Amino acid sequence: MAKDFTPRPEDRFSFGLWTVGNRGRDPFGDAVRRTIEVPEMLKGLADIGVYGVSFHDDDLMTFGASESVRRGEVELFKKTLDETGLVCTMATTNLFFHPIFKDGAFTSNDRDVRRYAIQKVMRNIDVAAELGAPTYVFWGGREGVESAAAKDTRDALARYAEAIDFLAGYVKDKGYSMRFALEPKPNEPRGDIFLPTVGHALAFIEKLEHREMVGVNPEVAHETMSGLSFYQGVAQAIWQDKLFHIDLNDQRPGRFDQDFRFGSEGLKDHFFLVRLLENSGYSGVKHFDAHAYRTEDVDGVWDFARGCIRNYLAFAEKAREFDADPRVAAAMSYTGVADLAEPTIGSFSKEAAAGLLAESFDVEALAQRGYGIEALDQLAVDHILGIA
């Protein structure tokens, strides 16, 4: 019998307007399904138990429209949020679609473009604050190069940092309760994008003036595109207290950015990712940044959204079963999983250094140890497959 994985508000699942609103365009074909207007999106998400919603400025407000038109669109959004009970969980700025950003936004070689990009973000930060969004995401899709001759990367990073610092100062000056999250991606639409991985973004943050209010928004597909472990990137972000937001979807390694339904491809990877999120104390939203297959009509869009939620909750249940299995506990004990939490030697002191230098180790005996990871990993696979 199929299990009922009905989400609860405390699960804090969220979708972007651009996800369920995606009409299936790709570089080789036009839209395949009708436009879903914003009120219909919100009502559809509320019907399947979603907690919140996020937006780009240009998803919500018509680019280039009069201020009165844009204000009307915001008011309709607020009204529908109230009617549905959804909350605004995150906002971001579209700094990639318009031709003005062909050479970048914060890192464009044209100073006026850079200034316009910062202005565009400031205006949307005001809207995001009005809507109560606690997180503001920066994805630098056009911040990059096709030719290394076109930009000095050191100058580009300096301009990137200048923009983030200025905008953080703006938020602080306005008294907004808002944090920033940088979203890494290695390539596409640019040949090479600045801040391509979680590690690059974490290192960049340490150079910022207001680094305490800037974290990361890692995405499954983006880290997988570069052949890296998304789990490891998220774990390091948690370790550094910098996981401010997360984008969940799926991706086949070595491909273009696919944004598949969460849990549709990398089952073991997602099992460990969900287990990490559930066991780490992460309390932020679980944000699905994915799209329905291009084969789908509007009904298929809601099948896609329900599938993202169902898969996350199924992985969470499997993770709880795995952690409660006494065979897993025994295998982890044999492997020494908990032993890694014990300090190796602690802080430096002359006495500790002298003691370590005086210690002797049986290197050959230590080298003979087996860790039993095959058996432990197979238990994880057994639980995922439902044969434990």
Image (tube, rainbow, N blue to C red):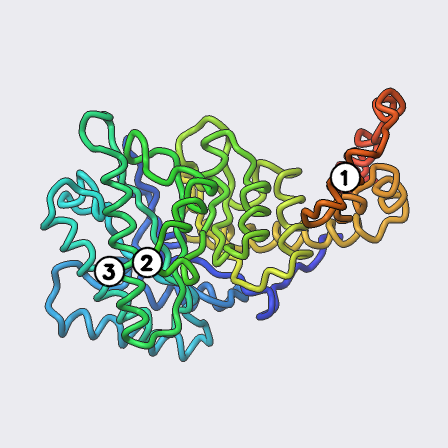
Give residue 354's mark.
1
Residue shown at the point (31%, 76%) measured from the top left:
130
Residue type, numbered disc 3: Val
Give residue 121's mark.
3
Q: Position of residue 231 (x, y in %)?
A: 59, 42
- Sequence-wise first label, 2 or 1: 2
**Residue 333 quadrant:** top right
Say which of 160 and 98 sits in front.
Answer: 160
- Sequence-wise first label, 1 or 3: 3
Residue behind mark 2: 92
- Give the answer, above or below, for where 169 lies relative to 31: below
Residue shown at the point (50%, 42%) measured from the top left:
220
- Observer-side mark, 2 or 1, equals 1
Q: Quadrant of the C terminus?
A: top right
Say which of 115 and 9 sits in front.
Answer: 115
- Sequence-wise first label, 2 or 3: 2
Residue type, numbered disc 2: Thr
**How much space separates mark 2 and mark 3, taking CA atoms?**
8 Å
Q: Position of residue 169 (x, y in %)?
A: 28, 66
**How much space separates mark 1 and mark 3, taking CA atoms?**
56 Å
Residue contact at pointers 1 and 3, CB within 8 angstroms: no
- Give the answer, above or below, for where 77 lies relative to 226: below
Label 3 Cα neighbours within 10 Å, binned few <14 / some 14-19 / many ≥20 = many
Label 2 Cα neighbours within 10 Å, binned few <14 / some 14-19 / many ≥20 = many
- Observer-side mark, 1 or 3, equals 1
**Residue 71 quadrant:** bottom left
Residue shown at the point (18%, 38%) measured from the top left:
103
- Observer-side mark, 2 or 3, equals 3
